[in-house]
Amino acid sequence: MFFLKENCIHNCIIIGSGPSGYSAAIYAARYGLNPILFSGPNPGGQLTYTNDIENYLGFPESIDGISFMDNCKKQALRFNTKILNKTINKVILSNDIGGTHRVFFGKSQDYLDSIGIIIATGSSSSFLGIKKEKELVGLGISFCATCDGFFHKEKDVAVVGGGDSALEETLYLSKICKKVYLLVRKNYLKASKILQKKVFEKKNVEINFSSIVTEIIGNDFLEGIKIFEKKNKTIRTVLLSGLFVAIGHIPNTDIFKNQINLDNKGYIIVKKGSTITNKPGVFAAGDVMDINYRQAITSASTGCMAAIDLDKYLSSL
Ligand code: NDP
């Protein structure tokens, strides 16, 4: 049991419990920083939606997302990370070198103070917002082709979106699946020209412009979708084993607005090649600062970097 000490200033508070948060915790603990990790509203993060992780180095037989995150938690506990199943709902970040940051949690606005903060709150996939979508995540509906594409080998799937992510997902799936329907709500693609060219060259990709998914078919698992075609105002049914939603991500940075520098998409800005933010002692790791890679392994890597950056910072005070 962990008891919060009153008037105690901690060295390391980690906000978030995905691969970056736990990786930061393991490294910080081994540096003797006594990390306290707040697991947040969705303990384990986005990976807990993934059935099988087949591309994380060191797991030749693959592992399901929940077990993987459970292992991360156990490993962090082994090095005496204090894990609080609570959500930070407000932060006050100091501008001073060696200054104390305050994080608030719970309804009664409990708080903890720390000189070091590692933000690892991740990002959330945007949902289409239609019925059955959330229930069938992991049962045919996915947000990650590299994680789940293999389960649809030689089958028909659809990808929703017209940006770089959607086209990358499409290209990946086109190598595995029989047919890929790319469903774009506008009559043009937003993605980079180079990706567009590659997708246009794929013989098993059918691009449907001005197309909107209106309904998900299937109760226990995805069986198909209904698509509204704006041009001729018709609805058609397509049977599928997989639906990949790639309509963007939202970094989980609401509580950091006006506290830390964010880019115009809401991602935390870090100094190139590091996890250093504009606030002394505050570091950011994982999807909350990474718009490009967004993989479990890159997320874990930046968690490690954040702990190293924090240790260096504390040693310099
Ligand atoms: P984007 O925001 O760039 O694109 C989202 C796409 O989804 C748009 O086509 C958008 O349509 C569509 N969309 C949004 N909401 C809906 C909806 N409700 N129904 C149907 N379609 C919808 O997100 P990405 O994840 O593609 O990219 C994010 C950033 O990451 C970009 O800056 C991108 O360049 C970058 N990235 C780079 C990669 C690379 O360089 N290899 C790979 C992946 C991402 P509309 O245009 O109508 O708004």
Image (tube, helix red, strand yellow):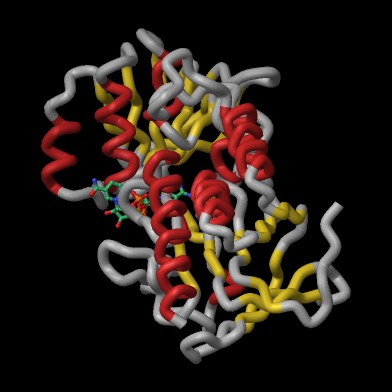
Residue 317: image x %, image y %? Answer: 46, 82
For image coordinates 70% across by 70% down, the residue present is: 89
Residue 302: image x %, image y %? Answer: 40, 53
Observer able to see residue 196: yes
Observer able to see residue 230: no
Considering every residue shown, the one lying at the far bottom of the view is: 96
Q: How many marks?
A: 0
- Vertical side of 90 occupied by 183: above or below: above
Considering every residue shown, the one lying at the far top of the view is: 154
For image coordinates 25% across by 24% down, the residue present is: 205
> In terms of depth relative to the viewer, which is nearer, 87 or 77?
77
Dividing the picture into quarters, in which one does residue 10 lie?
bottom right
For image coordinates 41% across by 74% down, the residue present is: 277
Residue 225: image x %, image y %? Answer: 52, 26
- Vertical side of 108 occupied by 131: above or below: above
Is 197 left or right of 111, judged from the image as shown? left
For image coordinates 61% across by 73% down, the residue present is: 255
> In terms of depth relative to the viewer, which is nearer, 59 or 308?
308
Dividing the picture into quarters, in which one does residue 200 lie?
top left
Dividing the picture into quarters, in which one does residue 8 lie?
bottom right
Residue 199: image x %, image y %? Answer: 19, 32
